[in-house]
Amino acid sequence: MASRFVSQRALVESAAGGGAKVWQEIIKLSQQPHIVSNLGQGFPDFAGARVAREAAARVLEGTDASSLKLNQYSPVPGTARLRAALLRAWKSSAPASDAYTEEDNVVVTTSGTEGLYATMQACLNVGDEVLVMQPYFPWYVPCVRMAGATPVCVSLEPGTWRIPFEALERAVTVKTKAVIVNTPHNPTGHVASAGELERLSRFCVEHNLLVVSDEVYEPFVFKRASETDGARHEHVRIAHLPGMQERTVTIGSASKMFSLTGWRVGFLYGPKALVNAVNIVHSYNSYCAPTPLQDGVAAALEDMYCKGDSSEIWAEIKDLRDSFEDNARLLVDALRTVGVESSVPDGGYFLVADVARFPLPGAPRGARTTDVDFSRWLATCGVICVPMSCFYSLDGGPVPDSLVRFAICKRKETILKAVEAIRAGRSC
Ligand code: PMP
């Protein structure tokens, strides 16, 4: 009877099961008191950007006229200060021909998650199809479905995690409206090269598709990325490639940029008509992002784009980038000593390991270990990781069953505790 009051849309998502159920189990496991190292969810376990926190604190505590105003609603698309700072950040890598303005092309959203949701609501109609590359950030598929459209999943090239152009060509139809791309990539750590993104641009122009480019991990491209494949990898905005600005929505977030996942401040850039449509959805969804926190994010961006070499935030980001890369190295080495091989990430917050040959205590000799069994067992040793099957759709081709994801966006001591537990592994 109670389900009479629940919408069909919500019922579909709550029945989706599979990955979503496993994900909930992992969150529950991570809350147990014996957990010493939570490498499950991608949130930092250190303080976020000081410049942002102090600027927001001044607004929260201030009683002057300007602070009072900043504790109330902001305009729907965000405060003028933050939009100006976001536009400056955008222009820092845009071609000279870029004509974006803060009025027409920038929206502050209530998190990157809301940016994705609002974009899907703003651009999709019932019957549209959206190409989604898996493994993926698990919010993409429900966001597409909740907009009434159909996600069509294709798998990234296993191991290299490159964009699978042949599979995309096979999957595109007259109903395809958009493709979602994510670089640096969650969960694989792949950073799409300029060559890949140029080819994706040609594909989108040829088939007249919108690109939803999820770039929330943009500052985190590792040093090693410049050596992979002999090609130089750096963060490339697909929107800045020829012909792409009019067909790209770029999503970003203070969650990752400033290590402030609890603030729920995100942003997006796009062509005027789409940004107008996103603003309409955003206004009915949350109206505006938290105003005092918008001021904190603006202060951090101003530090990055107005202070040149003396920017505290850039120094912090560079340190974090190096420490995440070191964390990945530590984990890769520790996992190798217990027979687990990993894909070394080129960027982002995560690394992926294959546990098929890891001998679980008590399992028959030579038995294959699955991602879910390994993750449950590792939790008993005090370490949390996430089974990668959570990041696949059941109707998008074969789902690998022995890959797990570890978050590397943590303090070194958190990683060292995990390394210790993994090494002690078989005896625990
Ligand atoms: N995109 C990707 C690829 C992510 O991993 C995340 C968060 N884990 C988001 C978007 C959303 O970020 P937030 O809602 O915290 O801004």
Image: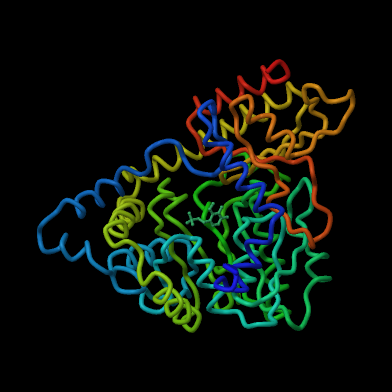
Instruction: Determine if residue 222 is in view.
Output: no
Asked whether 220 or 225 is in front, the reply is: 220
Query: Residue sitting at 51 percent across and 61 percent down?
Result: 113
Give the image location of residue 108, x and y in percent. Answer: 39, 67
Query: Residue sitting at 33 percent across and 69 percent down?
Result: 78
Asked whether 342 or 67 is in front, the reply is: 67
Instruction: Determine if residue 198 is in view.
Output: yes
Vertical order, 89 against 400 (above or below): below
User: Which quadrant of the rendered structure holds the C terminus?
Assistant: top right
Asked whether 151 or 198 is in front, the reply is: 151
Q: Determine the image quadrant of residue 283.
A: bottom left
User: Which quadrant of the rendered structure holds the N terminus?
Assistant: bottom right
Give the image location of residue 375, x and y in percent. Answer: 68, 35
Vertical order, 20 against 204 (above or below): above
Give the image location of residue 156, x and y in percent. Answer: 75, 56
Query: Residue sitting at 64 percent across and 62 percent down?
Result: 181
Give the image location of residue 29, x and y in percent. Answer: 59, 37
